[in-house]
Image (spheres, helix red, strand yellow):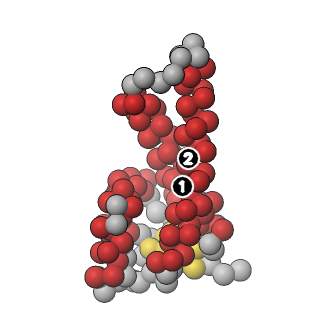
Amino acid sequence: MQSNVSFFRRIGSISYDLFLVFSFVFFMAGIVILINDKEPITNPFFFFLVTLPAIYAYFSISWVKGKQTLGMRAWKFEIIQKDGGNITYQQSIIRFLLAVVSLAGIGFIFQFLNKYKLPIHDYYSKTYLMSIYK
């Protein structure tokens, strides 16, 4: 099966979602600072451990329950399995972890080198992006 979502539509969706995630991280920073007696966060590893599960939860729940993040909804495509059904949480964690590789550029280069036109995170999680023009 081959994805019918272009590289540029993927990048558009990623841009939307990154703005949302950055906003969410700033909001979480405010909460952590308030809990920390209004002191700045001095341990970036702690903040990373706080925000990463929340960011994963946004993507995972969006993909598994609704087939779309807000960025995917704006660009009119969804994520599916080969049979057209919702992806699983196992697929979402593989996709999320490998998306970091894709954001570094390597995963998207992989998209142009395989016959299914899938970036590395979709290839190994066995997920596909499909247009949903309504």
Please indicate whether residue 46 sits to the left or right of residue 65 in the image: left
The Cα–Cα distance between marks 1 and 2, rounded to whole angstroms, is: 6 Å
Q: Where does the N terminus fall, quadrant-wise?
A: bottom left
Which residue is tagged 1? 18
* Residue drawn at (29%, 82%) of the image: 114
Q: How many marks?
A: 2
In the image, residue 5 sits, relative to residue 121, either above or below, namely below
* Residue drawn at (59%, 53%) of the image: 19
* Residue drawn at (60%, 51%) of the image: 20
Q: Which image quadrant is residue 12 in?
A: bottom right
Please indicate whether residue 130 sits to the left or right of residue 108 in the image: right
The answer to whether the residue labelled 1 contacts the one labelled 2, judged by CB atoms less than 8 Å apart, is: yes
Please indicate whether residue 27 sits to the left or right of residue 93 in the image: right
Q: Amino acid at mark 1?
A: Leu
Location of residue 49 in the rendering, given as x and y in whole percent from the top left corner: 40, 33
In the image, residue 16 sits, relative to residue 55, either above or below, namely below
State the SS at label 1: helix
Location of residue 92 in the rendering, given as x and y in whole percent from the top left corner: 42, 56
Location of residue 51 in the rendering, given as x and y in whole percent from the top left corner: 48, 37
Q: Amino acid at mark 2?
A: Phe
Seen as rendered, the residue at the extreme top is: 37
Label 1 crowd bin: few (<14), some (14–19), many (20+), radius 10 Å: few
In the image, residue 48 sits, relative to residue 88, either above or below, namely above
Seen as rendered, the residue at the extreme bottom is: 115
Residue 44 visible at all: yes
Foreground residue, 107 or 57? 107
Location of residue 76 in the rendering, given as x and y in whole percent from the top left corner: 63, 74
Label number found at residue 22? 2
* Residue drawn at (36%, 56%) of the image: 100
Seen as rendered, the residue at the extreme right is: 134
